[in-house]
Image (cartoon, rainbow, N blue to C red):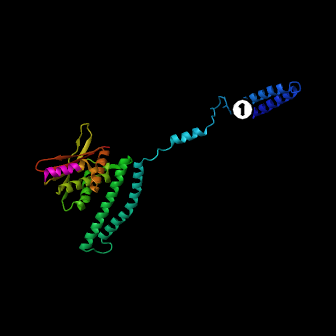
Amino acid sequence: MKLRGVAVLTALYFVAVWILMAQEYRYLGAIVLLVGALVASIQVVRSLQAPPSSSSGPAVIPLRAASIQETIETHSAEPETPERQRARFLGALGHELRNPLNSVTGFADMLLSGADGELNAEQERSVHTIRASAERLLRLVATVVDQARVRAGTLRLQQQWVAPSELVSETTNFVRPRAEGKSVIGDVADALPRVFVDRHRTIDALVGLAVLVIRSSGTDVSIRVAPPRRDQVGKGFVQFDLMTHLKDSSTDTLAIVERLERPSSRTDALGLEVSVARSIIEAQGGRIWTEAGTAGSFRVCMTLPTSP
């Protein structure tokens, strides 16, 4: 406000002087005084726009519209990649598919429990088939969503401490309906340490590997868990062995190794399961490999860590 008052007084002063001088040096005085008034006005305007120089507080610098826009662009989130968009879409679609499938399994369990009356043998077989199909679709939906999240780098594991015996028990229960008449046996040593894994995804990985062995070999499979050991850097792990005896050692071995090492080259659901299984196990610090023994014995080995 003070500077504005000074500007007004300065302008009035120049006008008054111009009037007094205009009588004798009309044109020259007018030009000189108008130029002086213009220069003075520019200085006054600059002083009004300059930040205060007082040391009592920080200087206030006016923000430009361009700098605000640059700040917004700098701190804005990066645009979604096609992989992330696909993963988000499949996640939403998977959620919508899980609800009716869970309803199917729930009603199937209710019928099998006899809540609506006893079922005869044929009805019970039909309900078991319905439930097994719904379970398989649920697992397939979860596998597709997990594969999209692995590729997008957005997969989040819900790791917890789990006993190896629980993993093997649940795995055998899920594998038997898909075993095509083959035997599935679980054998776990006593007093094994717990492993730190994502329970549901690890079980899905074991199921996929077991089904791979059964379909490739056409024989029974045994899931065994060996006592804990340590790797070269001293980290503890538990080894799961999916063991079988091959009818044709060379052909069946090649089939299993091919499907295990290059699962994405196959277009069936099992190839997708095996691909995601490898990604899940490796993301948790484990690994998968195969070993061929004598007399046609063969096993798919998988390790899981005993510490976070």
Neighbor class of circle 1 (other Cα within 10 Å; few <14, some 14-19, many 20+) is: few
Residue 94 appears in which quarter of the rendering? bottom left
Quadrant assignment for the C terminus? top left
Residue lying farthest to the right in this orientation: 23
Residue 184 placed where, x, y %? 20, 58
Residue 32 seen in the current view: yes
Is residue 115 within the magenta segment?
A: no
Residue lying farthest to the left in this orientation: 295
Front-lying residue, 37 or 95: 37
Quadrant assignment for the N terminus? top right
Question: In the shown orientation, is residue 245 left or right of residue 19?
Answer: left
Question: In the shown orientation, is residue 183 left or right of residue 80?
Answer: left
Q: Residue at x 40, y 52 (%)?
A: 86
Q: Magenta region, mostly helix, strand or loop?
A: helix
Is 296 located above or below residue 30 in the figure? below
- Residues rendered magenta in the picture: 248-258
Is 72 located above or below residue 45 in the figure? below
Front-lying residue, 96 or 21: 21
Front-lying residue, 199 or 259: 259
Question: In the shown orientation, is residue 243 left or right of residue 39?
Answer: left
The residue to which callout 1 is attached is: 45
Q: Residue at x 83, y 30 (%)?
A: 15
Total marks shown come to 1
Q: Residue at x 16, y 51 (%)?
A: 251
The three-letter code of the residue at mark 1 reads: Val
Residue 187 placed where, x, y %? 19, 53
Residue 254 placed where, x, y %? 18, 49
Element under disc 1: helix
Residue 156 seen in the current view: no
